Amino acid sequence: MNYFFFLDHPDKDLKSSVEICNYEPISNFYNKPQDKKNIYIFYIESGSWKNEIIEEIDYGDRKIIEKNDLPNFLKNKNIFISLSSRKIKSNHSPIIDNSLDSTPAWRSNIKIFNNNSSCSYQGELPSSLLNKKLSLVSCSPFLQLDNDNFQNYFYLVNMYKEPIIEKFSVDILDSNKNILKQLTCYTNTINCHDLTFLKEFNYKNKMFVFRSQSYGGIPIYFSKSSDNSQMSLEHTHPPTEYLFSGNRMFFQKRKKSHWFE
Amino acid sequence: MYNIKKKITSNNFSIYLRNFLSIRPSIYNNSKNIRESVSDFFYWDQTDDNETKFILTNICSHVLPEINQNDNVSIFIYNYNGKFIKEKKFTLSPFETIEVYFNDPDLIGKSGSFFVFHKFKEFGKLIANNCHIAERGYSGFRQNKGLWNFVHGNHYAAAINNNNKIYSLISKNFFKTTYKMQLSTQDTDNFSVIFNNPSKDNINIILFSYDKSKNLKIKKKLNIRPFCTEVTNFKNQSISYLEIKSNIMMCRPLIKKYYKTYFDIFHC
């Protein structure tokens, strides 16, 4: 099972959508039922998980879901979307199973857009992560701080099986491990932070490190021109992506240890 | 026993057999030597008002932060026609990150693809863990000096041996595989799909494009020669969705979508 999410933005001119597909990218790599599925949304209300079925989707179909098209009571909530053939009770917690496990990963097009432009990436949040209290080390070279016309934002998408909204800190470091700033994030939330304050720091080394020992998530960086005519969206790789084959997790742990020391 | 079984099932002939029989198929072949560095085959574009940059970082510092060492990087640049243009060399000090621009006079007005290979002395525990250093980093694209639009690496496309020979790691299948894009193109009527070939063999691709009602509109055959880059443009053709058929196990292209005021580029 993979989850997808809306990248809500404080600028009301910008909308968010998820294009969800009920088909795997490569059939040779997928051996599970190719059937009609329910599009589920999950959210937290009064300290409990709730879910709704938006609609059914036939095998082979795609559906673009805009956050603005959801019922009013969901518009201010952090929404996680997925696909499942299962029928569950409305207070069931997010489903954790391997029904969408495929190679390459089963993804959705996660987008921020307005009437003139758009940016997106193919993303997913595997349900296997919901059981884990993750940490974060994200080395980002994406920030465009040298042009006053550009604004930069950090999204951290956290989803955890327990229906708790817990505060945690994300440190922003330079490459010498100096802490430049602490951001406040929350669990089970699509956290979004304006990074304009980073303009006051020396950006010569082109890399900022975002770290948290408490919780992790998907780190995504969004840049835009002040008139919203130009946008860019990309996530950083997990540390394992710097390696090919073998026991890559060994080095992921070491990299995290280095930045947590 | 586990290691012996793993060695038998993960050599390149076994991978070919696994792919042929669709038993635990694999997207990549193995490299020949554990000390070899691996790279994606990245796209670059300096035509018209387009510019490209690459974020080059000392990968040793990311993977082996306890070892204080320089990272010697070679960027091998090819034009769209597969012709090798040049090698650019850099030495990065520990934890150093630089931006490499493709604005040399001999690259202006051109486009193509490039490899980024890292070489260094101390391998730490990489060999014991059977891991290769791999460059799958970040390219930035912009138009008219606008905002940089970033895209990360897509594949473990190729490795380089001690004699500076580059060879592909992309695995193939006797039967064709269909890659189904998990997105539509209905939000714009102007987009490009970008493929490149990191191998020394020609790659044949069939691109199926469908309209909103799932009717096949265009079937296009592409023959991509070694190290070439193929950009297929779709304009005012009401294409809603694409499928890609080839002998490549995962033939995943870049897509560049044009909107009213800017563009978006990502792996689809």
Image (cartoon, coloured by chain):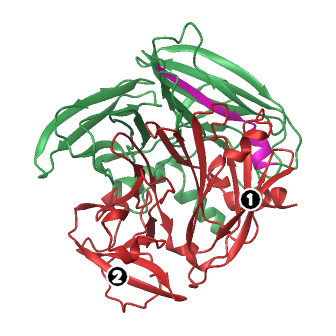
Chain colours: A red, B green
Residue in the picture at 75% in, 62% down: A253
- Left or right of A176 in this view: A111: left
Q: Secondary structure at mark 1?
A: strand
* Residue at figure coordinates x 32%, y 52% from the top left: B183
Q: Position of residue A139 (x, y in %)?
A: 70, 48
Q: Position of residue B219 (x, y in %)?
A: 16, 37
Over which residues does the magenta segment extend? B50-64
Q: Nearer the viewer, residue B248 or B66?
A: B66
The residue that mark 1 highlights is A211
Q: Which residue is mark 2?
A: A52
Residue A208 is situated, as x and y percent measured from the top left of the image, at 73, 46
Q: Is residue A250 above or below residue B245?
A: below
**What residue type is disc 2 on?**
Glu
Same chain for the residues under marks 1 and 2 in the image? yes
Horizontal relation, residue B17 to residue A236: left or right: left
Q: Does the magenta segment cover residue B244? A: no
The mark nearer the N terminus, 1 or 2, is: 2
Inter-mark Cα distance, 1 to 2: 33 Å
Dividing the picture into quadrants, the one containing residue B245 is top left
